[in-house]
C-alpha cells in the first residue's frame, strides 16, 4: 500500500505486559493494597478493556488510564525515549476521565473527570453530569486543588516550553470549556524538602481569557499553537494563537474561511481522546483540521456533513499559496459497516485524504498548483482496503493516533509500493505524481534514483503528455538542493510542466509562512530560474567564435573555471569508474554552457536569497549543476551496463546490435529533453551519440539527423570515423557526406586524415582559395613561356604560374604560421582534373 503505518506505541504491547507482571508479582507476594504502583496488581483480566490513551504530549510521552475491579482510576505515563512506564496517580473512585495532561517535569497532573449516573451505562456520560477539573501535585503525591466544578465538560492541556533545560518556576495550563471559552492558568511551584514540588500559592492561581465564542479548536502540540474558529454572520474566521516559552501568547493571524460552522456543534481536535461522540456517527459530522510543516505551509482541510453517501466533497485551503481546491468523489452504493468517516493525514510535503474501503487521495501541498503532482487511488486498489478502518487522528510530525486500538503510528509513504505502482500504472498523471512523491519523500535518495533511472531507461517513451527524462532531471535536481533552504521552491524549477495579514514577525515557521505569503502577494514576474539568459549568451559566444571575435580574457577565464569546478565536483561525488565513455574530450561548447549556467544561476540566487553566505550559494550552485550532469550520466550508465555495451564500439565499423539501437534511442531522448530546457550535457555526449548514430542509421537517415542538428559532428567523432572506417564505396559516401558538412577549419584538419583522391581535391581547392585571398596583382609579361609540364590550355598555364609564384614567395611565411605546403604540381593535376570534369571532357 502507498501509506505505511509504523507502530511507535501499542497499549496492548507496551503497557499491558507491565500491568500483568505487576499483578502476578503482587499475587505471589500476597500483596493487598499498597503504594501507587500496587494499583496495577489489582487490575483483573476482564478490566483490561478499560485501558485507553488519554493524551500525547509535545515530548511524545503518552498518558493512559485504566481501572481495577472496584472502578478506581489509574493514570500512567509511557516515556517514548526510555520506553518505560511510570505510574502517575490513582483516584480511588469510580470516575470517567474526560481529559488529562501532565507538565513537562511530571510534577503536576491536571485531570477533568465526571461521575456516572446510576441509571447510565458504563462509559456513557449523561447531560448534566458534574465535571470536576483537578490539579494534583504528584512529586510526591500531595495536594489536590479543584480548578473547576461545573456542569459542562472541560478539557485540559499543559503548555510545553521549547526550552526544557532547567526546572520551570511557573507552569501554564489551558482549560477549554464546552461553553466555548479557553482560559490559561499561571501555576507557580516551589521545591521543598529536597525534590518535593508544591504549588506556591494554591489559594490563588492567576488566570486570563485566551479565546471565547468559538465553535471549533485545534491544538498543535509540537509547535504550541492554538487554532480556533470564530463564527461570523456571513462566514467563519480562522484565528491562530502562538504561545511562547514564557507563557505569553500572540494572535498571529485572522483568515476568513468560506465555510459555515455555526450549526455544526462544538468540536475539538488534538485535545486528547474525545470519546464523548458516538464513533459510529462520525460520518455524520464535519471534519476540519489544520496542517503545517517546517517549510512554511499551512493547509486547512475541510469536509462538511454528508446528507448522502452517493458523493463526498472535501476542500483544502492552501493558505501559503493563496488559493483553495474542492474535490468531489462519487461513491455510489455504500456498505454501512465499511464507511467510518473521512480522515485527513499530515505527511510533511503531502496531505492524505482517506475514506476506508473507497479511495486514497495523496495531495501535494508543497506544489498544489500542479494537480498532476497529486495521486488519487480508488476502486479495488489494495491501498484502499489495507489501512485501518477505525478513525485516525493526525498529530504533529506525521504521527497518527488510532484511539480505538490504542496505537500510535508514524505514517510514511511506502517507497516499495510506489516504485511497484510506477512500473504497473498506465496513466501519465499517476506516473508524474508517483515520480515526485518518491523523490520528495525518499529516505535513501541514491537507491531511489537508481530505481527510477532503471524504470526510465526501460520506459523512456511510455509518457505522452510530458517528457519523462526532462521531468526526472528537473525534479531530482530540485529535491537534491531543496533542503539547503526552504526558499528554493520559489527560485528553482521543480517541474518541467510549469487574504490575510500576519501580525508579528517571528523566526522559524512564521518567518517561512510570511515569506510564502509575500511571494504570493508581490511576485508578479516569476522568480523561478530558467536558462533563457544562458541560451542567449551561449549563442552570442558561439557566433563570436565563428567570426573570430573574442570577449575579454577575464570573462572567458571565469566561464571556463566555472566549468572546471563543476566537473571536479562531479568527479569527487562519483569515485567509481564509469563504463560509459564520457568526459574523455574537451567539448568546449558544453563546457561553455556549463560555465554560463553556473554564472547565471549564482547571480539569480544571490539576488533573491538574502542572509546566506556567498560561498554557500556558490557551493549550492555547483552541486545543482553537477547533479544535473550526474543524472544524465547515471541514466546512460544504467542503460549501458544493462545492455553489456563496451567502449570498443567506438572503434569499429560493424553493424549495430539491438542493444546499441536501444541506447541510441535513449540518448536521442536525453538530447531532446535537455535541448528544450537548454541544459548542459556531459563532455563527450555528442561524440558518443554520433558514433552510435553512424552504426545504427542508414545513410539517408543519418544525414537527415546531421542536417537537423540531432547529431553533431564533433572533431573527435569525425577523426575516429576517418581513421577506423575503410574506403569501401559505402564508407566513401559517408566520409564525403561528413566532410562537406564540417565547418571549414575542422574540415581542413579532417581532410588530411583521409588518404583519398577526393580528400586531396578538397585540400588543393582550399589551398588555392587561401593563396588567392591575399593575392595582389603584379605586372606580368604578356608572353607565357611553355614549360615542359605545361598544357595546351593557356588559362590554366597562366593560373599555375601565378600559384607557383605566390607559393614560392610565401613559403617561409606559411611554414612559420604552421600551414602545410602543397606542391604546385599537385595543384596543377587537381585543378586540371576538376576543370575537365566541369567541361565534361
Image (spheres, rainbow, N blue to C red):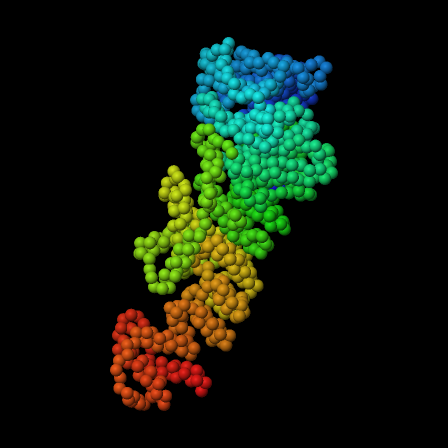
Using the rendered view, name the quadrant where residue 66 is placed: top right
The location of residue 726, given as percent across then percent down, is 47, 74
Farthest front residue?
Answer: 234
Task: Name the residue at 41% across, 68% down.
Answer: 743
Task: Name the residue at 54% across, 60% down.
Answer: 665
The location of residue 267, given as percent across then percent down, is 61, 25
In-front residue for pair 594/145: 594
- When the figure is inspected, residue 374 is found, relative to residue 336, above or below; the finding is below
Is residue 12 visible in the rendered image? The answer is: no
- When the figure is inspected, residue 335 is found, relative to residue 37, above or below; the finding is below
Quadrant in which the C terminus is drawn:
bottom left
- When the figure is inspected, residue 759 is found, relative to residue 212, above or below; the finding is below
Is residue 129 visible in the rendered image? The answer is: yes
Task: Name the residue at 34% across, 64% down.
Answer: 548
In-front residue for pair 59/89: 59
The location of residue 507, given as percent across then percent down, is 43, 31
The location of residue 410, given as percent across then percent down, is 57, 34
Task: Name the residue at 42% across, 74% down.
Answer: 754
- When the figure is inspected, residue 532 is found, relative to residue 688, above or below; the finding is above
In-front residue for pair 407/207: 207
Amino acid at each position: 500500500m502507498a501509506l505505511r503505518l509504523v507502530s511507535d506505541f501499542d497499549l496492548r504491547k507496551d503497557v499491558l505486559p507491565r500491568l500483568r507482571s505487576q499483578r502476578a508479582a503482587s499475587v505471589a507476594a500476597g500483596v493487598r493494597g499498597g503504594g501507587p504502583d500496587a494499583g496495577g496488581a489489582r487490575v483483573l483480566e476482564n478490566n483490561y478493556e478499560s485501558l485507553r490513551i488519554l493524551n500525547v504530549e509535545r515530548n511524545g510521552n503518552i498518558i493512559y488510564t485504566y481501572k481495577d475491579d472496584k472502578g478506581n482510576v489509574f493514570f500512567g505515563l509511557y516515556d517514548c525515549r526510555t520506553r518505560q512506564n511510570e505510574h502517575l496517580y490513582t483516584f480511588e473512585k469510580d470516575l470517567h476521565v474526560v481529559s488529562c495532561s501532565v507538565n513537562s517535569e511530571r510534577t503536576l497532573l491536571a485531570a477533568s473527570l465526571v461521575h456516572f449516573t446510576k441509571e447510565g451505562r458504563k462509559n456513557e456520560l449523561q447531560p448534566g453530569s458534574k465535571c470536576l477539573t483537578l490539579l494534583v501535585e504528584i512529586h510526591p503525591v500531595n495536594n489536590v486543588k479543584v480548578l473547576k466544578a461545573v456542569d459542562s465538560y472541560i478539557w485540559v492541556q499543559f503548555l510545553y516550553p521549547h526550552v526544557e533545560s532547567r526546572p520551570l518556576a511557573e507552569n501554564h495550563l489551558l482549560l477549554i470549556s464546552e461553553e466555548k471559552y479557553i482560559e490559561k492558568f499561571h501555576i507557580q511551584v516551589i521545591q521543598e524538602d529536597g525534590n518535593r514540588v508544591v504549588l506556591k500559592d494554591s489559594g490563588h492561581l492567576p488566570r486570563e481569557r485566551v479565546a471565547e465564542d468559538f465553535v471549533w479548536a485545534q491544538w498543535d502540540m509540537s509547535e504550541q499553537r492554538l487554532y480556533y474558529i470564530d463564527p461570523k454572520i456571513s462566514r467563519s474566521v480562522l484565528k491562530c494563537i502562538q504561545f511562547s516559552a514564557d507563557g505569553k501568547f500572540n494572535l498571529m493571524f485572522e483568515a476568513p474561511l468560506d465555510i459555515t460552522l455555526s450549526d455544526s456543534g462544538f468540536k475539538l481536535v488534538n485535545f486528547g481522546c474525545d470519546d464523548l461522540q458516538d464513533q459510529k456517527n462520525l460520518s455524520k459530522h464535519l471534519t476540519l483540521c489544520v496542517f503545517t510543516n517546517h517549510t512554511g505551509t499551512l493547509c486547512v482541510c475541510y469536509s462538511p456533513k454528508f446528507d448522502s453517501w452517493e458523493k463526498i466533497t472535501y476542500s483544502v485551503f492552501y493558505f501559503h499559496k493563496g488559493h483553495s481546491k474542492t474535490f468531489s468523489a462519487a461513491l455510489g452504493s455504500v456498505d454501512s459497516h465499511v464507511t467510518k468517516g473521512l480522515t485527513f493525514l499530515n505527511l510533511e510535503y503531502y496531505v492524505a485524504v482517506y475514506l476506508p474501503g473507497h479511495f486514497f487521495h495523496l495531495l501535494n501541498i508543497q506544489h498544489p498548483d500542479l494537480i498532476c503532482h497529486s495521486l488519487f487511488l480508488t476502486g479495488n486498489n489494495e491501498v484502499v482496503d489495507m489501512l485501518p478502518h477505525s478513525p485516525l487522528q493526525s498529530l504533529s510530525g506525521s504521527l497518527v493516533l488510532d484511539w480505538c486500538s490504542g496505537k500510535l503510528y508514524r505514517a510514511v509513504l511506502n517507497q516499495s509500493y510506489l516504485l511497484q505502482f510506477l512500473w504497473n500504472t498506465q496513466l501519465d498523471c499517476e506516473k508524474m505524481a508517483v515520480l515526485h512523491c518518491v523523490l520528495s519523500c525518499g529516505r535513501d535518495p541514491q537507491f531511489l534514483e537508481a530505481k527510477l533511472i532503471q524504470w526510465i531507461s526501460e520506459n523512456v517513451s511510455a509518457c505522452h503528455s510530458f517528457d519523462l527524462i526532462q521531468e526526472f532531471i528537473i525534479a531530482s535536481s530540485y529535491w537534491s538542493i531543496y533542503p539547503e533552504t526552504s526558499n528554493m521552491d520559489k527560485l528553482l524549477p521543480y517541474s518541467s510542466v510549469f487574504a490575510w495579514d500576519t501580525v508579528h514577525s517571528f523566526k522559524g515557521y512564521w518567518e517561512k509562512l510570511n515569506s510564502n505569503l509575500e511571494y504570493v502577494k508581490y511576485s508578479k514576474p516569476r522568480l523561478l530560474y530558467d536558462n533563457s539568459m544562458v541560451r542567449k549568451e551561449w549563442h552570442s559566444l558561439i557566433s563570436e567564435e565563428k567570426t573570430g571575435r573574442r570577449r575579454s580574457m577575464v570573462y572567458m577565464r571565469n566561464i571556463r573555471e566555472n566549468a572546471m569546478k563543476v566537473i571536479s565536483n562531479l568527479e569527487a561525488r562519483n569515485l567509481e569508474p564509469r563504463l560509459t565513455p564520457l568526459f574523455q574530450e574537451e567539448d568546449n561548447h558544453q563546457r561553455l554552457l556549463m560555465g554560463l549556467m553556473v554564472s547565471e544561476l549564482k547571480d539569480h540566487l544571490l539576488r533573491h536569497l538574502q542572509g546566506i553566505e556567498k560561498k554557500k550559494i556558490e557551493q549550492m550552485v555547483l552541486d545543482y549543476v553537477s547533479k544535473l550532469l550526474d543524472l544524465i550520466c547515471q541514466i546512460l550508465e544504467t542503460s549501458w551496463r544493462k545492455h553489456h555495451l563496451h567502449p570498443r564500439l567506438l572503434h569499429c565499423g560493424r553493424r549495430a546490435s539491438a542493444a546499441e539501437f536501444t541506447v541510441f534511442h535513449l540518448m536521442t531522448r536525453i538530447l531532446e529533453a535537455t535541448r528544450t530546457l537548454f541544459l548542459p550535457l556531459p563532455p563527450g555526449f555528442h561524440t558518443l551519440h554520433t558514433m552510435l548514430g553512424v552504426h545504427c542509421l542508414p545513410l539517408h537517415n543519418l544525414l537527415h539527423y546531421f542536417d537537423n542538428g540531432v547529431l553533431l559532428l564533433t572533431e573527435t567523432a569525425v577523426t575516429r570515423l576517418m581513421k577506423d572506417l575503410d574506403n569501401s564505396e559505402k564508407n566513401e559516401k559517408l566520409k564525403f557526406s561528413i566532410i562537406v558538412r564540417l565547418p571549414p577549419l575542422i574540415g581542413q584538419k579532417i581532410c588530411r586524415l583521409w588518404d583519398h583522391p577526393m580528400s586531396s581535391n578538397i585540400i588543393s581547392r582550399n589551398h588555392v582559395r587561401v593563396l588567392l585571398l591575399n593575392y595582389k596583382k603584379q605586372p606580368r609579361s604578356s608572353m607565357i613561356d611553355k614549360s615542359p609540364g605545361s598544357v595546351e590550355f593557356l588559362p590554366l598555364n597562366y593560373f599555375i604560374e601565378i600559384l607557383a609564384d605566390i607559393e614560392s614567395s610565401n613559403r617561409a611565411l606559411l611554414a612559420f604560421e604552421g600551414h602545410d605546403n602543397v606542391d604546385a604540381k599537385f595543384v596543377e593535376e587537381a585543378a586540371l582534373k576538376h576543370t575537365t570534369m566541369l567541361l565534361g571532357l
